[in-house]
Amino acid sequence: MLGKTAGGLLWLFRYMERSENLARLVETGQRIALTRPDRAESEWTSVLETAWARSGYEEDHDEVTGEQVIDWLLRSRDNPASVINCVENARMNARLVRTALTREVWEAVNECWMTLCDALSRKITAKELPRILGLIKQRSAFVRGSLHGTMLRNDIYDFARLGTFMERADATARLLDVKYYVLLPTASGVGSSLDNAQWEVILRSVSAEGAFRMVHGRVRRAQDIAKFLILDKRQPRSLAFCYGKIGDNLAYLESDYGVRLPSHDLVEDIRRDLDRATIEGIFDQGLHEFLQEFLRRNTELAAQVEQDYRFSQ
């Protein structure tokens, strides 16, 4: 496969996953802000920091408000990482790799773009916001479903899945980090009703509340929730689950091409460290420090895959 085709596939699905994760982040910000109405500005600032969008936002805005942050993250053309720009970039990459996609995948991407261009063409009211966020997540799921249901399990599929799970791991780590580092920087709040409510919001934001209850019952401890979203290999948005899939798809590429590359060693190191980790050790190390190191290594792996498979050629 040409490197440009591999890169186009990976980025198509990174952008689709990113659009969904931005919707989840906005939903999380809105719910957490409701639990702390006296500090709503700091909550929305933390959402901007999580999305790596604060500097761009502050260049265009004098103050931080929920309405403006939502508009910036979902529909601003001036924000390169907004949902509308992510969906447009996904469609551009889909056009680049059109011959590698089934008709169903291409149509799902194209319909996603048309639907969201219409939905995000005007300012979103507070009443409309839940419906719009649900629509973004739904359209991303349609693209993912068409991939699963129609694509041959070959190198094309592997690069698409790499994009999905690299982006998803990044998003889960950032959601956890914004909760425990930005939103609750002091130990005095740990275990309080406010702390527990915020952790429940995080579970809902990754559609994991029911799954968590199935595993851990109705008692929600911060340590159990963090373990579920970091180390539980059954939870499809956990870091361990994502890296299990990334490792599998890179192993399939190694087998298909008959070449072992530095990215294969790097992903094995990350998987091994996640396998050996305990939640007690992570909290002793510092959850923020652990997540920041994970994000650094995830970015390093993405750059190594790009280099190994020559995306620029």
Image (spheres, grey):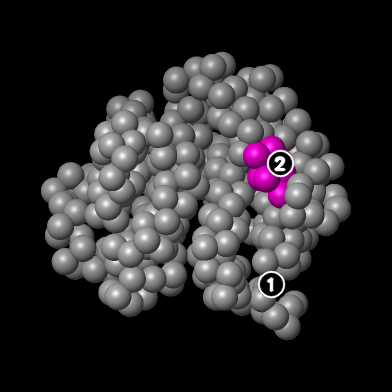
> Residue at 30% of width from left, 27% of height from top?
255
- Relative to residue 208, is residue 47 drawn left or right? right
Which residue corresponds to mark 1? Answer: 65
Q: Position of residue 158 (x, y in %)?
A: 44, 31
Q: Position of residue 178 (x, y in %)?
A: 44, 65
| Badge 1 element | loop
Q: Position of residue 119 (x, y in %)?
A: 80, 43
Depth check, front residue: 164 or 204: 204
Q: Is the stretch drawn in magenta largely helix, strand or loop?
A: helix
> Residue at 47% of width from left, 39% of height from top?
207
Depth check, front residue: 90 or 31: 31
Which residue corresponds to mark 2? Answer: 131
Q: Amino acid at mark 1?
A: Thr
Dot 1, how many residues are within 10 Å of its Cα: few (below 14), some (14-19), or many (20+)? Answer: some
> Residue at 28% of width from left, 37% of height from top?
217
- Relative to residue 124, is residue 298 drawn left or right? left
> Residue at 73% of width from left, 83% of height from top?
62
| Separation of residues labelled 1 and 2 (CA atoms) | 20 Å
Q: Quadrant of residue 80?
A: bottom right
Whether residue 306 is visible to the viewer of this picture, yes or no, is: no
Q: Work out whether 62 lies above or below 236.
A: below
Is residue 205 part of the magenta span, yes or no?
no
